[in-house]
Image: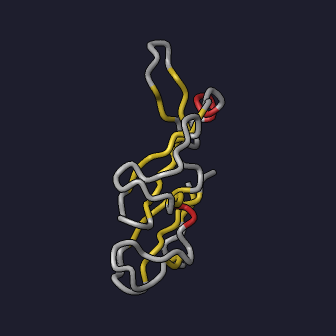
């Protein structure tokens, strides 16, 4: 099961929705990355990695990080201040730089 949550900046109201299971993947017979999600248990069992959406807290760039090739810096600006989008609670908003992200309690969903 996966849980989705939306984080909203208290200042500019920018919203980012994140899923706690990221994007699990396996490599198919042709060498291509294939994503598997709940409730596809057969393909989930084949997964060898996970692409997780990340946010640069310096410039606002949104990008994916592969668990098998992790990055420590933003690919756009080079800042090390990056976060998995599922961990944005209490983080300063990179868009308005004036307020923090908080979980929207009415947005939680389960898949």
Residue at 53% x, 76% y: name it. 103
Q: In this view, does 102 lie above or below 69?
A: below
State which quadrant residue 16 falls in. bottom left
Residue at 54% x, 79% y: name it. 105
Residue at 58% x, 40% y: name it. 67
Tell me residue 46's x, y (percent): 62, 26
User: Quick one: quadrant of the C terminus?
Assistant: bottom right
Observer-nearest residue: 85 or 28? 85
Q: Is residue 103 above or below residue 35?
A: below
Numbered label tally: 0
State which quadrant residue 10 falls in. bottom left
Tell me residue 77's x, y (percent): 36, 56
State which quadrant residue 93 falls in. bottom left
Q: How is the image coloured?
A: secondary structure
Tell me residue 85's x, y (percent): 50, 61
Tell me residue 27's x, y (percent): 52, 23
Which residue of the protein is positioned furthest toward the front in this rendering? Answer: 78
Taking 6 as reference, is 24 left or right? right
Observer-nearest residue: 68 or 7? 68
Which residue of the protein is positioned furthest toward the top in this rendering? Answer: 29
Q: In this view, does 92 lie above or below 63?
A: below
Q: In this view, does 90 lie above or below 3?
A: below
Residue at 53% x, 57% y: name it. 84
């Amino acid at each position: 099961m996966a849980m989705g949550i939306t984080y909203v900046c208290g200042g500019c109201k920018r919203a980012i929705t994140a899923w706690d299971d990221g994007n699990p993947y396996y490599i198919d017979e042709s060498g291509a990355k294939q994503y598997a999600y709940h409730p596809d248990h057969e393909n989930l069992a084949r997964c060898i990695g996970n692409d997780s959406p990340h946010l640069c807290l310096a410039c606002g760039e949104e990008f994916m990080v592969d668990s098998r090739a992790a990055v420590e810096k933003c690919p756009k600006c080079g800042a090390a201040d990056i976060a998995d989008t599922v961990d944005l609670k209490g983080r300063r908003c990179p868009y308005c730089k004036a307020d923090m992200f908080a979980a929207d309690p009415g947005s939680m969903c389960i898949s």
